[in-house]
Amino acid sequence: MKIILKEDISNLGYKDDVVEVKSGYGRNYLIPTGKAVIATPSALKVLAENQRQRAHKLAKIKADAEALAASLADVKLTIGAKTSSTGTIFGSVNAIQIAEALEKLGFNVDRKAIVVKETVKEVGNYNATLKLHKEVSVEVPFEVVAE
């Protein structure tokens, strides 16, 4: 079944994408929760017209994301965490701590846009991917140190 997404859904697509999903997923979850609509010919025409009208605004959003990505290219974060004597962290470092560290440096990045592939449970160097736009992402290295 073809649907039009009304918002970004991880591992499926971005807002205004036309995607193919299984019927049950579309009818029982996406459509009732307002995350998608069925891709009828009239809905596709409305989508095309909306995208045409928003093209200028979307280009500005993408340019802003690219500018932010360029400024984040040289950033190296240091995150302090409480550790044991062996260097193991009590808990773990996640997207919330990375977003707070970026905010201290003056970058306002939504924590939902930060992806850390491996679990950070020890002191060391890691990378986080920031998905600033559907076509713009940047790798930010960060170091976890003992407090």
Image (spheres, rainbow, N blue to C red):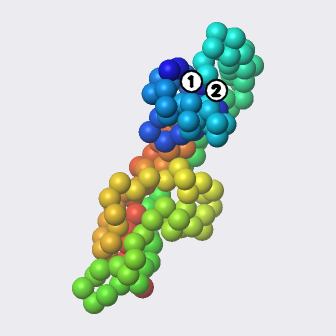
Residue 97 place in picture, x, y as percent:
51, 68
Residue 18 place in picture, x, y as percent:
55, 22
Which quarter of the figure has residue 132? top right
Disc 2 secondary structure class: strand
- Give me the residue at 53% from left, 50% from top: 113
Q: Residue furthest right?
A: 53
Position of 17 with respect to 76 (left or right) is right
Position of 60 with respect to 141 (left or right) is right
Q: Amino acid at mark 2?
A: Val
Q: Which callout, 2 or 1, points at the residue further toward the start of the chain?
A: 1
Position of 90 with respect to 24 (left or right) is left
Which quarter of the figure has residue 109? bottom right
User: What residue did someone put label 1 on?
Assistant: 3
Which quarter of the figure has residue 60? top right
Disc 1 secondary structure class: strand
Let me know if residue 101 appears in the view: yes
Residue 67 place in picture, x, y as percent:
58, 41
Q: Which mark is residue 146?
A: none
Let me know if residue 72 appears in the view: no
Q: Are marks 2 and 1 in contact (CB under 8 Å)?
A: yes
Q: Is residue 129 above or below residue 64?
A: below
Q: Nearer the viewer, residue 12 or 129?
A: 12
Q: Amino acid at mark 1?
A: Ile
Residue 30 place in picture, x, y as percent:
58, 35
User: What residue did someone put label 2 on?
Assistant: 37
- Give me the residue at 62% from left, 32% from top: 31
Q: Residues within 10 Å of mark 1 (few under 14, many from 20)?
A: many
Q: Residue furthest bottom?
A: 85
Q: Is residue 83 above or below residue 106?
A: below
